[in-house]
Image: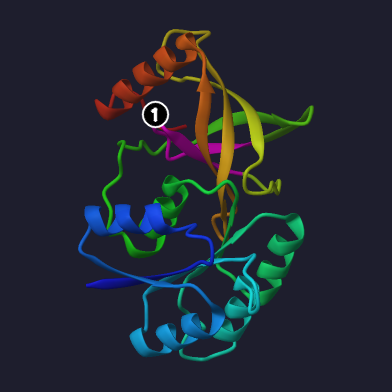
Amino acid sequence: MHTILFVHASGLFQEAGETIARRSRTRVLYASAGGEALATARREKPDLIFVEAEMPGMTGVDICRVLKADGAFSHTPLAVVCATPEAETESQRAGTDVVLGRPLETGDVVDVIRRYLQILPRDAARSSVGWDVTFWRDGLQHHGRIRDLSQGGFFVHTTVRQPIGARLEISFDVPGVKPGRQVVAEAIVVRLGQEPERGLGCRFFRLSAGSRTHLEECLRILSLGEAAAV
């Protein structure tokens, strides 16, 4: 049985922890202060740790720094939830494996757990593709290759760095569907891919009715094996 430790002073992970305990055979532990978190981690040896960056006293960044300097935890995945760019930068310097932004959604936590522990089924089937995608943020145009497409979101391979919580406008053609069909949508960055999978994990948050229809048709064709990734 896997063990996950959630460290928060504000109840940040309570809903996510309850969801994980309900949906999987996972032991969920909580700590509300730095000393308690370190003692629990050393005693219980969790498989994955989530910490809130902005905590009184010993912060989540401090906890990350201490654990990553300990050989017993140097390879234990650790995610830090940050409210500011400064906290994000400090977390990365401290050696965190994942930086999550605020407001935090349960789906963000679930995505990290799936990535590192593979203990939760996906809510929606994903199709492996390799299509060019154009995306914009603050009026600047960028390009990448989209993969792991589902009704809920996608991962885009790109060298462009964007922060967790960034809102993107995206557009991509749908191969295998009638010519001229495009998906145009708005998405939010929920995770950052690490080398060698550098890129952005994104969740759709606004799709027009037409784009949703095109996306559903595209996924149906892919599930039937009628269109190949290009």
> Magenta residues, as a range?
144-157
Q: Which amino acid is tagged 1?
A: Gln
Q: Quadrant of residue 151?
A: top left
Q: Position of residue 178 (x, y in %)?
A: 43, 8
Q: Of residues 182 and 175, which is closer to you in this image?
A: 182
**Which type of secondary structure does the marked residue at label 1 adopt?**
loop
Residue beneath the point at 72% across and 34% down: 142
Q: Position of residue 113 (x, y in %)?
A: 38, 59
Residue behind mark 1: 151
Q: Position of residue 75 (x, y in %)?
A: 48, 80
Q: Quadrant of residue 166?
A: top right
Residue beneath the point at 58% across and 79% down: 63
Is 149 magenta? The answer is yes
Position of 191 relative to 154 (above/below)? below
Q: Main secondary structure of the magenta part?
A: strand
Residue beneath the point at 56% across and 60% down: 196
Q: Is residue 160 left or right of residue 117?
A: right
Q: Is residue 91 left or right of residue 36?
A: right
Q: Residues within 10 Å of mark 1 (few under 14, many from 20)?
A: some
Position of 95 relative to 177 (above/below)? below
